[in-house]
Image (spheres, rainbow, N blue to C red):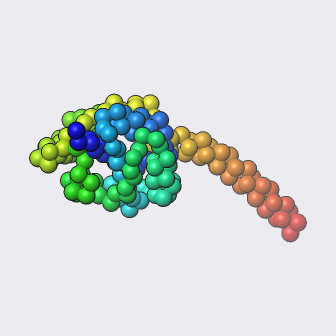
């Protein structure tokens, strides 16, 4: 019997349980799992922001996961182009994308190539965007407090200087 090759792709910035769940569930469906890690320029082109964790580190984190057999750096969202390079049998994506026009089109393209699009359970309670927002809230509040203190000190120093004149 031929080995079933699976593929999934993502940014994997600020690696969290949702990422792990996707990769673990993907591995349950195949014999050999290839994970594409999106290049920084690609991420910036569709998210309008650069990842916090550099590409080399994100790829190394994913490579260290026992469910992953191979990591590739991806520079395209076009799964047909990726398939032409690695010839996977199945491609895995979170079921939060079900019904999305882009993924419906991708599913049809994969069928034409003899590959199958498989939707896996999406982890609802966490995402890199949520983590980024929490960090902004936490550090933003601390940053504002720090700035208020520094501004107050600056004002006090300026007041002392002006009373001396």
Q: Nearer the viewer, residue 36 or 163?
A: 36
Rendering quarter of residue 138: top right
* Rendered-image quadrant of the C terminus: bottom right
Rendering quarter of residue 30: top left
- The image shows residue 119, relative to residue 70, as above or below, that is above
* Rendered-image quadrant of the N terminus: top left
- The image shows residue 139, relative to residue 56, as above or below, that is above
Residue 164 place in picture, x, y as percent? 88, 66
Residue 83 place in picture, x, y as percent? 23, 53
Residue 143 place in picture, x, y as percent? 64, 49
Q: Nearer the viewer, residue 88 or 17?
A: 88
Classify residue 2 as left or right of residue 55.
left
Residue drawn 45% across the image and 47% down it? 62
- The image shows residue 82, relative to residue 67, as above or below, that is below
Residue drawn 34% across the image and 37% down it? 26
Which residue is the extreme one toward the bottom? 165
Query: In this orientation, does residue 103 appear?
Result: no
- The image shows residue 161, relative to residue 89, as above or below, that is below
Rendering quarter of residue 42: bottom left
Q: How many marks?
A: 0
Q: Nearer the viewer, residue 89 or 37?
A: 89
């Amino acid at each position: 019997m031929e080995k079933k090759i699976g593929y999934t792709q993502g940014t994997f910035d600020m690696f969290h349980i949702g990422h792990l769940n996707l990769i673990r569930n993907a591995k349950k469906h195949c014999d050999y799992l290839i994970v594409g890690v999106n290049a920084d320029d690609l991420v910036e082109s569709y998210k309008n922001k650069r990842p916090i964790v550099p590409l080399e580190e994100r790829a190394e984190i994913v490579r260290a996961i026992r469910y992953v057999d191979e990591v590739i750096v991806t520079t395209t969202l076009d799964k047909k182009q990726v398939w032409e390079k690695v010839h996977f049998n199945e491609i895995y994506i979170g079921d939060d994308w079900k019904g999305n026009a882009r993924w419906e089109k991708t599913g049809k393209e994969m069928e034409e190539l003899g590959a199958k699009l498989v939707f896996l359970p999406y982890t609802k309670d966490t995402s890199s965007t949520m983590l980024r927002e929490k960090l902004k809230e936490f550090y933003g509040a601390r940053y504002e407090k720090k700035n208020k203190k520094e501004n107050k000190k600056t004002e006090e120093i300026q007041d002392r200087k002006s009373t001396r004149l």
